Image (spheres, rainbow, N blue to C red):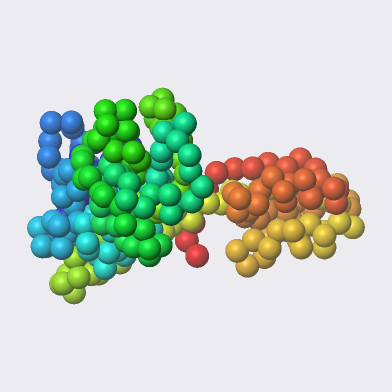
Amino acid sequence: MLRLAIQKSGRLSEDSLNLIRECGISFLSASYKLKTEATNFPLEILYLRDDDIPGYVQDGVADLGIVGQNVLVESGFPALEVEGLGFSKCRLSLAVPRAAAYDSVQDLQGVNIATSYPRILGDYLAERGVKANLHTISGSVEIAPSIGLAEAICDIVSSGSTLLGNGLREVETVFRSEAVLIANQNLSAEKKELLEQLQFRMQAVRRARRNKYIVLNAPVAALDAVKALLPGIKSPTVTKLAEDGWVSVQSVVNEDDFWHITSQLKAVGAEGILVLPIEKMIS
């Protein structure tokens, strides 16, 4: 049985559990439970503090983990990463008071900076030849300038509203992060096989999230132009309609390209365009 460690609460926990469920894995979850076992896959889920997950996986207490890449790198165990999962994206950024002068990272020379990520920030500053005084604190980093602890901060940013609410402005992006799957490097052959099965399911779910299924009607005269816009996985499916001179075309479109391609399809004569979500997509 694989033991998978995830954050016990918060957005990353919710997104991780949703991914596991979309992989067709069933389990009971309750806020008071610190572990649960899947009913239809050999998987046990452990609910832990996110900062503890890399160490637990490194030591073999857990076989796998889902954790923010920022936490993984800060822990000093980046080699545990198996693959990015594409959700819970954020950035680690430097911020200064709104009224403070700032032209470049060189302005931070000798400055006091409060952060929960001294390893990542220290490496970033060292690469740029900046020597600053790092004050490591956990939680409420944004308050540091207003209480005189530091002149700048480095913390996780999603929308930036927390910075604005505390009179700060973002000036440098230090690190970009997303949720990652990590694994102990000494898994048995049996557990490696289970990991491959789990990855196969996760990749099918993630691939489906990034794509849409599209169905449309088009005049035969425009078919070549439509096919050029819709390559599909191998090629689009084309079916004759009851009305002469018309065909139905079915294909897959990447979410990022969807609106651009749709406008082009309309321009070449496509009609009745339907867009449907894909539950799983196996290449």
Q: How many marks?
A: 0
Q: Nearer the viewer, residue 224 or 150?
A: 150
Q: Residue at x 59, y 49 (%)?
A: 255
Horizontal arrangement in the rendering, residue 111 relative to residue 187 (left or right):
right
Farthest residue in the top direction?
165
The residue shown at (38%, 49%) is 108
Residue at point 53%, 51% (across, down): 210
Location of residue 228 by image quarter: bottom right
Give coordinates of residue 257: x percent, y percent: 65, 52
Which of the pair 90/181 is nearer the observer?
90
Quarter of the rendering containing residue 56: bottom left
Write the residue at 51% across / 47% down.
103
Nearest the eye: 196 or 154: 154
- Tell me if I can see residue 134 in this picture: yes
Instruction: Judge from the rendering whether residue 164 lies leftward or rightward of residue 110; answer left or right.
Output: right
Q: Quadrant of residue 123?
A: bottom left
Residue 22 visible to the viewer: no
Quadrant that contains the N terminus = bottom left
Determine whether 33 is above or below 81 in the image.
Answer: above
Q: Position of residue 192 (x, y in %)?
A: 23, 69
Residue that extends furthest to the bottom in the rendered view of this protein: 189
Where in the figure is residue 232, as x and y percent of width and height? 64, 61
Q: Where in the figure is residue 94, as x and y percent of width and height?
A: 40, 45
Q: For this rendering, which residue is in front, 188 or 85? A: 85
